[in-house]
Image (cartoon, rainbow, N blue to C red):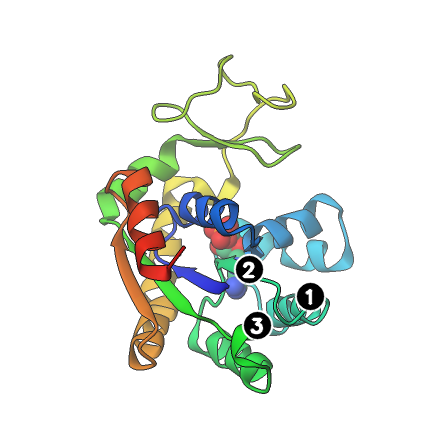
Amino acid sequence: MRLVTLGPPGAGKGTQTDRLAEHYQIKHISTGDMLREEMRNNTPIGREITGIMNAGQLVPDEVVNSMVSALIRGMAKDEGFVFDGFPRNVKQAEFLDNLLSKEPEVSRIKRVIYITAPDEVILARMAGRRVCPHCGSVFHVEHHPPKVDGSCDSCHNALVQREDDKESTVLNRLKIYRTQTEPVIDYYSKKDLLVVVSGVADIKMTTRKLIDILGE
Ligand code: AMP
């Protein structure tokens, strides 16, 4: 099964994507994680995108599209995945469509899950989010605190706030989301692929609802 999740930053895309990937045993593809890895490894792409990422702007389509295309081409035609953070604008959605349009039915996007959340929830979630720069584990100071304050449960490295989770940057990311990513919702709605769920509802019940819609 091949899926896409959409929604504002902090709506809970990562959480639902993880849970669906686990349930269906499909790959969780986060373009944000792929780009952060380029930065961690200090590759030429990583160096090119650091300023853009830290400012909360979108990385150029060519960079993201070529990473996604290489990944999909390396997969079996029936291998499932769920995208988290891609496509981020209509051009990327069209690129994905073109990439899969000549493929068999099983390779196409089956559903697009749109996770909604109000701005005040998003701001509170992002302000409290802490990440491990070493292994990528994600915590929240209130809702999902680490066992030892400020230290990663998995690898015990010091947790940090992502540069792009700082409030002024989050506001900028929301603005970019409204202008560039929201039109993607309409794009998939016209194709009759959209499923809408609330990012503030109970996490387990939301996953259950999605599995009921998508099928076991
Ligand atoms: P995320 O982890 O999905 O919140 O993404 C973090 C940042 O990575 C975004 O603010 C962008 O700078 C960049 N990014 C992730 N996915 C994309 C994409 N599909 N297109 C452009 N930039 C992206």
- Residue 25 location, x and y as percent? 55, 50
Q: Label 3: how many residues lie within 10 Å, few (<14), some (14-19) or many (20+)?
A: some
Question: Position of 210 compared to 32: left or right?
Answer: left
The kind of secondary structure element at disc 3 is helix
Amino acid on which the number 2 mark rests in the picture = Phe
Q: Disc 1, disc 2: CB below 8 Å?
A: yes
Dot placed on the residue nearer the N-terminal end, 2 or 3? 3
Front-lying residue, 166 or 123? 123
The CA span between labels 1 and 3 is 21 Å
The CA span between labels 1 and 2 is 10 Å
> Residue sitting at 63 percent across and 67 percent down?
68
The CA span between labels 2 and 3 is 20 Å
- Residue picked out by circle 2: 81
> Residue sitting at 56 percent across and 20 percent down?
153
Q: Label 2: how many residues lie within 10 Å, few (<14), some (14-19) or many (20+)?
A: many
Front-lying residue, 179 or 19? 19
Q: Nearer the viewer, mark 1 or mark 3?
A: 1
> Residue sitting at 59 percent across and 87 percent down?
102
Q: Is mark 3 within 8 Å of ligand 1?
A: yes
- Residue 14 location, x and y as percent? 45, 46
Q: Nearer the viewer, mark 2 or mark 3?
A: 2
Amino acid on which the number 3 mark rests in the picture = Asp
Dot placed on the residue nearer the N-terminal end, 1 or 2? 1
The answer to which image quadrant residue 181 occupies is: bottom left
- Residue picked out by circle 1: 75
Dot placed on the residue nearer the N-terminal end, 1 or 3? 3
Q: Is residue 55 at least partly visible in the picture?
A: no
Tell me: residue 167, above or below residue 8: above
- Residue picked out by circle 3: 61
